[in-house]
Image: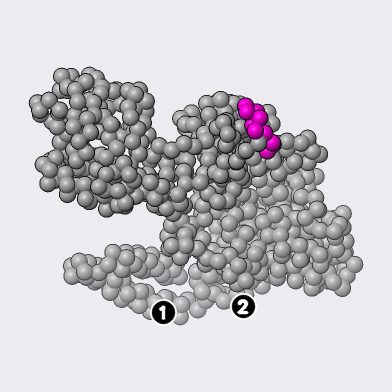
Amino acid sequence: INWCPHCCTSISDAEVDFAEQEGFFWHLRYPLKDGSGYVELATTRPETLLGDTAVAVNPDDERYKDIVGKTLILPLVGREIPVVADAYVEKDFGTGVVKITPAHDPNDFEVGLRHNLEVINVMDDTAHMNENAGKYQGMDRYECREAIVKDLEEGGFLVKIEPHTHNVGTCYRCKTTVEPRVSKQWFVKMEPLAKPAIKCVKEKQTQIIPERFEKVYYHWMENIKDWCISRQLWWGHRIPAWYCDDCGEVIVAKETPVACPKCGKNHLHQDEDTLDTWFSSALWPFSTLGWPDKTPELEYFYPTNTLVTGYDIIFFWVARMIFSAIEQTGQAPFKTVFMHGIVRDELGRKMSKSLGNGPDPIDVINRYGADALRFLLVTGNSPGNDIRYSEKRIEACANFANKLWNAARYVHMNIDDYDVENKLPDTLTTEDKWIVSKFNTVAKEVNENLEKFELGIAVQKVYEFIWDCYCDWYIELAKTRLSGDGEDAQNARQVLLYVLDQILRLLHPFMPYVTEEIWQTIPHEGETVMLAKYPEFKAELDFPEDVAEMERVMDAIRAIRNRRSEMNVPPSKKAKVYVATKFADTFTNGTPFIQKLASANEVEIAESFDIDGAVTVVTADAKIYIPLSELVDKDAEIARLNKELEQVKKRLAQSEGKLNNAGFVAKAPEAVIEKVKGQAAKEREQIALITAAIDALK
């Protein structure tokens, strides 16, 4: 078994973490009893020499055929030990000779069983040398190692010492180096349990998402060893085994026995060991529902639908729940296992107390809100992949919640003084159909992605719709109608309210608090948004032609805004816009939006224009002209741009001067050099943009 000398308990193979450690190979001489020479071998743990009961060589190794069956004298101890031939030994590794210590190495233990070797344990529970260690008794294992190496050198048994880096097993709890040792423990025979558990996943009775983790599951299950389930801990399920103090009979039972079934006496005591935590945890899917009794809860809830868990415990917990559940109930415990990643810090490191890089979630919630934290954990999330926590990202999530809150306030400003129903009006304008149809599509995409456990994609769709479509576009588009009191204004109010209601339902699983708070303030039916029907795609709300028509106008508005921004034209400065397009009706209907959102004082539409001295903006469906004289004072703007160009060129010269300075490059930290390179690249980009702007004006 694996034994932790610090926790003083056995631990399973899955609980051993391997860490790279610097060590040594000690090359030793073991003399032959007949005086004909010696064999040379190497070990990384010379202290276990005290428990050696044989030396092994490969049966096909020609070098050692003559000494198989001979006897060696164990250095420092004087014990006679045999030379055995066993295929376990790799003849091309090291000297091809291996010391066999059955009590302190799992492979040596197997060799010992095959050759009927004595098993001598030389350490106690705390990895101190015991009574079998002779004069080294009482020493810690590392103290003993030092003393033995010194004695071996003095006795002429030490040939040489080589530095050696190797993976060493450590306890997953306390990180103490594990000591393999022989110990009497309770085991579960795994072969009969593993086969149906493998079949369960292969036949998709249980589906693992993402699928690539099936390989991890199969590898563990197909190479599984018998499971040591007893632990020497003070807390846990106690081993259900009793011992008769009179005849020594061992009784394993579900109920506490009254008398020994062998001798009939009642002097019994229960095993003091507890079950491995993961053995107890493996019972969770059914034991929590009243099993082994056939309860209504077990009937209704078992098997469960989905287990959501981290990929790092697929063999600790997931696999064990599957084979335990199949064994105890005859059914797989869940239909789907969704593996999520680990939340890491900004540098990609696993959060830990020792590094101090894990934020306190309560502090984060107090600063940004629980919704922002939840949203952060879903945003950018993909099945089985790790995500990084950062203050900037959580600030962005909090800003999104504020954006939604402010949108809801705007809706209230426009509906509170009116009798507005929370349903779509009979008459919808093009912009109404656009927002309704866009939401309809988003609802479809979100449901599809949730079904595939693509939570990050689903939430990104919701985010983009709320921020871009509803807040940045539809609310602005609706403002041109909301100023009146007629039917058109009332219809806009209804659409604003209806879409807000649907948004809150769609977003609720990701941001439950702000959505519930807002939903309770708007006209609605039902007690809570949590129980309101989740949005789904409706064919009758799909308006692809209206969406295409509206987006032609929106593309034109974006293009005009971008060009004005490039030329530093303030939004307050109005200009006439000429739209050359074959979609005259579309742009005629969109004229009010172009005027309001693209700072146009007038819009003229025709199939073509011949205009000199105009800024040209091109979209997929229109060519737009804006008279330059209405946007800027050309000479003043060229002068301003030339001045800015000179300033950027000076900054670039400074950056390039540093990079061309051999002394700076040799002495400056890599991060500083990369920063200067980035600045230079940005400055070159600025020069290109400013030059293009000057050329355009000329």
Q: Where's the N terminus, which quadrant? A: top left
User: Where is residue 155 shown, x and y percent of the image?
Assistant: 12, 43
Q: Residue at x 81, y 67 (%)?
A: 521
Instruction: State the CA–CA distance, disc 1 to disc 2.
Output: 22 Å
Is 27 left, or right, of 132 in this rendering?
Answer: left
Q: Quadrant of residue 265?
A: top right
User: Where is residue 632 shown, x and y percent of the image?
Assistant: 52, 76
Question: On the image, numbered disc 2 is attached to which residue?
Answer: 572
For residue 639, which numbered disc appears in the image? Answer: 1
Decide whether the magenta segment is chiefly helix, strand or loop.
loop
Is 371 left, or right, of 312 in this rendering?
Answer: right
In the image, residue 7 lies in the stretch drawn in magenta:
no
Is 627 left, or right, of 605 in this rendering?
Answer: left
Marks 1 and 2 close (CB-CB < 8 Å): no
Q: Residue at x 38, y 46 (%)?
A: 124
Furthest-right residue in this view:
419
Q: Residue at x 51, y 74 (%)?
A: 568
What is the total number of numbered labels drawn onto the structure image? 2
Q: Compared with residue 655, is residue 509 higher up or lower down, i.e. above or below?
A: above
Is 415 left, or right, of 247 in this rendering?
Answer: right
| Magenta range | 255-265
Judged by depth in the image, the label closer to the viewer, 1 or 2, is 2
Q: For the residue labelled by badge 1, is the local secondary structure a helix, a strand or a loop?
A: helix
Q: What kind of residue is marked 2?
A: Ser
Task: Please say whether residue 256 is visible from this viewpoint.
Answer: yes
Task: Please say whether residue 590 is visible from this viewpoint.
Answer: no
Marks 1 and 2, the one that precedes in the sequence: 2
User: Where is residue 210 shown, x and y percent of the image?
Assistant: 55, 40
Q: For the residue labelled by badge 2, is the local secondary structure a helix, a strand or a loop?
A: loop
The answer to which of 211 and 317 lies nearer the viewer is: 317
